[in-house]
Amino acid sequence: MRLTILVDNCTCIDRYFLAEPALSIFIEDQGQRILFDCGYSDVFLHNAVRAGIDLLHLDFLAFSHGHLDHTWGLDALIRRITEARLQGLPHHPPHLVAHPRTFVSVFEPTAGDIGALLSREKVGHHFNCTFSTEPVALTERLTWLGTIPRLMPFESQDPIGSKADDERPDFLPDDTALAYRSEKGLVIITGCSHAGICNIVEYAKHLTGECRVVDIIGGLHLQSPSTAQLAGTIGYLEKEGLSHLHAGHCTDLASKIALARTLPLREVGSGLSLSY
């Protein structure tokens, strides 16, 4: 598997890519081309051009959850594919994989609607879709995890806004991640880890039967975390024996400094490419 971070909050040193507070990752594995999240704007499209990546020929488009910093770029991708169709250019629309509630609006008291711009019905006009709470195999080794069981008492305790369809507090049941079974162990690829990064890792191990974890890439949702959450997360990850920890996006500086004291934290940013 090879992955390239198309969008992150930061860029890597000496890499002339754009950044925004969002996430999008391009993955290639076993002949399959996967886009994981679309960021907030069309930045991921510009960075794909810089990286020489063709996003007109994707096999899968998978979403981690429905928040604006992961889904609002979908509008730009639809425009790009539609323009290619109108101009008679070669293209291959991807199969979309998401939780059934990913495209339900989310209202937050201060920010307003922070959910996806497009409805599930509208998305279905542009893509063949699989909406599932169960895991979906994207390749023989790469799995979209579906609903993550919430087991850790120090994680996933606070809702963010409320879903428009039932007006109940949103604990983000749609939040999920990817798990890749490498020869050395699991590589976990996350969006924001609203479900809790430790919950995600535990479920990935349970689902795949692989107990070794070699790397975690993406957002850990450690933004001014409670003392219990930060300590619990560090304690859990220390026991996993990670070779690398690529914590980015929604991981604040204080949390990165704390993680780096005992864990193999690595630089993350738009343009970073990793191979497994």
Image (cartoon, rainbow, N blue to C red):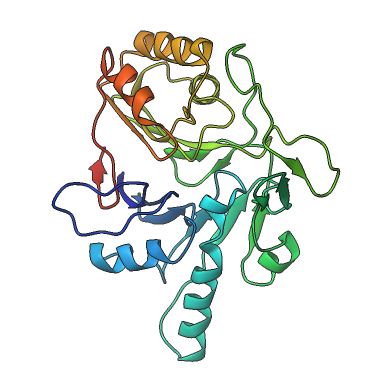
The vertical placement of 79 against 30, above or below, is below
The vertical placement of 276 against 71, above or below, is above
Res. 215 in view: no
Q: Residue furthest bottom?
A: 87
Which quarter of the rendering shows the N terminus?
A: top left
Q: Residue furthest front?
A: 110
**Residue that appears at 60% across and 37% down:** 175
At which x and y percent is residue 63?
Answer: 55, 49
**Residue that appears at 69% across and 35% down:** 173
Res. 133 in view: yes
At which x and y percent is residue 60?
Answer: 50, 57
The vertical placement of 224 against 76, above or below, is above
| Quarter of image, res 275 | top left
Count of marks, rendered view: 0
Left or right: 124, with 228 as reference point: right
| Front position in the image: 254 or 165 | 254
The vertical placement of 213 against 102, above or below, is above
At which x and y percent is residue 119?
Answer: 72, 62
**Residue that appears at 57% across and 37% down:** 176
